[in-house]
Amino acid sequence: MERQIYLENRAWQEGLALMMDKLAERCVPKNEFVDVRSALHRITGTIIRAKRSSPHFAASAMDGYAIRARDTHGISEREPRWLELGVQAIQVDTGDPIPEGMDAVVMIEEVLELSERGILLQSPVVPWNHVRPVGEDIVEGEVLLPIHHRIRPQDQGALLAAGVLEVEVRVKPRVGIMPTGDEIRPPEAALQVGDIVDSNSTVLASLVEEWGGTATVSPIIPDQPKLLEEAILKMAASEDILIIIAGSSQGRDDYTAQMVQKFGTLYSHGVAIKPGKPVVLGEVQGKPAIGIPGYPVSAYLTAHLFLEPWVKHLQGLSRDSQASLDTVISKKVFSSLGSEEFVRVKVGRVGERWVAAPLSRGAGVTMSLVRADGILRVPRLQEGFHEGETVPVELLRPVSELEDTLVCIGSHDLTLDVLSSHMKARGGQGGIASAHVGSLAGILSLRKGEAHCAGIHLLDPETGEYNRSYLQRFLPGREVALLNLVYRTQVLIVPKGNPLNIKTLEDLVKPGVRFINRQGGSGTRVLLDYLLQKQGINQGEILGYDREEFTHLAIAVAVASGAADVGLGIQSAAEALGLDYVLVGEERYDLAIPREYLDEPRMKAMISVVQSKAFQEDVLALGGYDVRETGKFLV
Amino acid sequence: MERQIYLENRAWQEGLALMMDKLAERCVPKNEFVDVRSALHRITGTIIRAKRSSPHFAASAMDGYAIRARDTHGISEREPRWLELGVQAIQVDTGDPIPEGMDAVVMIEEVLELSERGILLQSPVVPWNHVRPVGEDIVEGEVLLPIHHRIRPQDQGALLAAGVLEVEVRVKPRVGIMPTGDEIRPPEAALQVGDIVDSNSTVLASLVEEWGGTATVSPIIPDQPKLLEEAILKMAASEDILIIIAGSSQGRDDYTAQMVQKFGTLYSHGVAIKPGKPVVLGEVQGKPAIGIPGYPVSAYLTAHLFLEPWVKHLQGLSRDSQASLDTVISKKVFSSLGSEEFVRVKVGRVGERWVAAPLSRGAGVTMSLVRADGILRVPRLQEGFHEGETVPVELLRPVSELEDTLVCIGSHDLTLDVLSSHMKARGGQGGIASAHVGSLAGILSLRKGEAHCAGIHLLDPETGEYNRSYLQRFLPGREVALLNLVYRTQVLIVPKGNPLNIKTLEDLVKPGVRFINRQGGSGTRVLLDYLLQKQGINQGEILGYDREEFTHLAIAVAVASGAADVGLGIQSAAEALGLDYVLVGEERYDLAIPREYLDEPRMKAMISVVQSKAFQEDVLALGGYDVRETGKFLV
């Protein structure tokens, strides 16, 4: 296969429109009848009308007696009248049918006397008094549900009451999903170096399900034209829409494009989006065929842009308009001209403002989709957004959940995850949205009003004390509380068995020792620099001093994978990966909370969790933490 | 069974709190492991951590050559250097593992020359250049998902990438639903007079499914203590929550209460809500047991108030906060002191205001739940709301759909349903929300700014012309367009075969002929009164002139069911129910649209549908309509 270097570069909307133009009239929704009792969330395929009225008989609305209204003409307090039981008055309960010939009900409370003679009334009754007429609720022939309506529980109730047992709904569009690539392995396989897990098939199948379709996933297809050919033709025979997921390496989309061209028509190869550029659009045997790039983020986004409209179209629906929110961008977003870029962002409400913080932009970073609260679109002909610009974000989580979320930007600590889970365990929707940028950057976020709190552990080399002096320096004049979260142990993380026999910081400059560092501005970096200076060790002599990672776990993984021999990080990170470590010292990790947020309900909820015994016990179980001042406000 | 007349009258929140206090600690969420591929929408039962890093090997991020960075020390444009192929430089594609001993990648574009000798480089390369390190996306041990998180498609992707094949989630709470009552019949039964269809079981089972639980519905249990006893004990053995739905007549809840008391503990019988007052709260064998009233609206509301919190509690979740919207009440709402009342309302945005119009309040009116856009709560200690008051409404439909909806208040015509369906068929979300109050009340709604258009057919007795003069009288000085929807035939609707041989309006005063009338202010009523006056017929002599219905279909049903012998209505209503009819005359039915709404996109979309051939063909198929001016603006 030759690599077709120059992909097309049309706007994605144009690519989709081209495909719709060619195929939409041939691919139309189909209907089927299903039992109403299993029709929840199905889409009506026609107007649904009542087959019978409800109530289907005139019924008493009260406990009392059914009578003929004309038998009460002329009755008054002065001239009460007896109605003969069983002839002129028949006892009925609520819901009972009105007996033949009767046309009104008197409530039992309105009967003056009751004896063998009958009932004594003292006021006349109008016809249809306390009678629920036929069709009071539903009239035969009446429209119950419009076309293209998603059936809800209460709709099922109305259908059954109206005698509709089978309802005409859209057939669920069938989507055939074909993962391809020699290096792609099913999730249960033991992975070798070079293998990639097929997670895309599951993600796409679940999206199809959410959109109202049903997915069939083929076994993973190796890079052999014959096998892909067989799979495509088999899927084209049974499915409504074909999805071919390309393998992980560049240029694999060419292969899909060639296959689509061979068995059908290729409409477009490549659109001007990032990520997701090499998407393939075409048809095979009259079915929409979409080649989805293999990088997880690209797969997710292109499925939304190109697959969702087809799954909706085959149900007669338009794409749902995504809830969107105007947010202030917390840091400058660069984007290249010519491509519409989809940036994943975290969203939080701090004070009166909604703030969006961009997440990692790699197409392979699955977790950016998990962590994202929304998607920010940078238009094709724009080079990005300035910090502080107000832009709309399409939301991936409900606003009520975001409203409830505390935004915590600063240093990374494993207990923040525990804290968030404890908050959710108490029934809070939101928990904590934390961004790991280091202690100093966290304080700057507080200054810019982008966070409710910042996790910090900044040693003042002059005084040997933690945190307070940094707040005074960077947030002068602001009242900021310091809530102690933990004391934690910083260690030199080394491989199991400590093969290079590292004992002290001085060992970092030994020849052949490869160090891995934390980023500038992180508390751990500040601590390292402080200790190096104190012990007179030259940074420049440490091999790898310039290699930076952003979290303790990333340091531990670098050591565990052999990419480095040693790194400075917290003890719990070493323990999480079963590594050995050398004690360096203890440090204080606080949450810095500006005064104005202390009284917010979600902040109070967090403080109460930090002060709870259950939280502190879970923290101790991680190892490497001390909770002697956890939950205390420190001066 | 004796009727316990005095139900308790505590606030529903108190009843729920009492039940939670007694049971919440004994009824706790349970966990199970499920395959990640079928875990969509399940709720995590613990913190979920990564079992392996992703990528799990250092991989090339580019197509090029893997090298050792230190082999490039000192290289410059003046001193380029050859690296030996296969020894110092190994060809890699994107995603390929970095070969043992190598620590950087040079892109193919950076290679100056390529020959059998190797590759020629002219600048040094730093370690880890173009290498995706182990754990770039996910680090082993890292928290992937918090507890109490509803798993989304992208979460499944991250779990699989992180080596998590089985995920620990909440067991779906099991709800046992027991419909009871001698008069209750399964939906497929042929109904006799007095029978009631069991629609509640399906509605409740679907609600349970939406809330994340799973429902088991027992066969309908007749009113025999022994049988209910057996059913309750059987359900208590296998289910987590027990629901007993009372039959349709009053006092049936006593029966449930007695059973709960017999096998467990009765906490509360009756709460201060309307509808839904006779709800029963208790426990049987440590399981929450809830007696749900049989009226459909009561059943739906009490399930939301008392069942949803338990289904959520057993998953560790709090009840979702319902999206709510501030709306202006379009007409006064009365409510009795002492009960919290739940009023179903239609909601629409007209101009800048959101308007809520109360729907029918009967507990048996299933369609009020289908038509409702939201629920308005009238607090216990308040007697209602004034017209024009601004009050919050809990939404049952997404705001985007409501935004897209045209509010049409006025006279009833069957073609409005067809119109709404055509709008939805074109992919619009909203369609038309129509309220049937009669032509004059529709014009008043336009005056109050509560509707975008009003369907009217008002004959001016002075001029014999339609509609315009009424607009001049009731909306003086406002520019209002009249869009003709149809001309329609008004008929005297009579039973099949016309047994009373009714030929003209004069036959309405014949002895024994029972008439059914439309409400005052409806165009049909205006027409009737005009014709009666012209022909010198005395209203007072017509039996049933005072019996009023609000729609044409209701008139037809009254005739079809024998509740009346004749009524005036549109021909299509008679045809819908297979009745006979006598022609009375043709009338013009227009949509009155204030100038300021004509340019709204949703209004433009509606006008374009009215003018379309497809819509007009569907109208003609109903019978009794003429479309000669349909879609024309009339002066």
Image (cartoon, coloured by chain):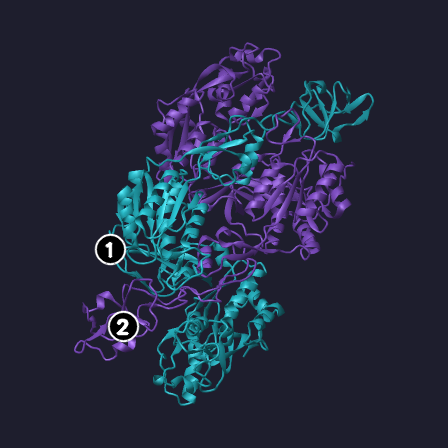
Chain colours: A cyan, B purple
Q: Which mark is residue B87?
A: 2
- Are dots 2 and 1 in contact, CB under 8 Å? no
Q: Position of residue B110 (x, y in %)?
A: 22, 68
Query: CA–CA distance between discs 2 and 1?
Result: 27 Å
The residue lying at 56 percent from left, 42 percent from top is B206
**Residue nearest the viewer, comparing A565 with A492:** A565
Protein chain holding label 1: A
Mark 1 Cα shell of 10 Å, populated few (<14), some (14-19), many (≥20) = few
Q: Position of residue A211 (x, y in %)?
A: 43, 45
Amino acid type at mark 2: Val
Amino acid type at mark 1: Arg
Task: Label 2, secondary structure: give it.
Answer: loop
Taking the image as shown, residue A92 lies to the left or right of residue B539, namely right
The residue lying at 49 percent from left, 77 percent from top is A580
Q: Which mark is residue A3?
A: 1
Residue B383 visible to an observer of this rendering: no
In front: label 2 or label 1: 2
Task: Label 1, secondary structure: give it.
Answer: loop
Asked if B96 appears above or below A235 in the picture, the reply is below
Residue A463 visible to an observer of this rendering: yes
Q: Position of residue A241 (x, y in %)?
A: 37, 42
**Residue nearest the viewer, comparing A369 with A77:** A369
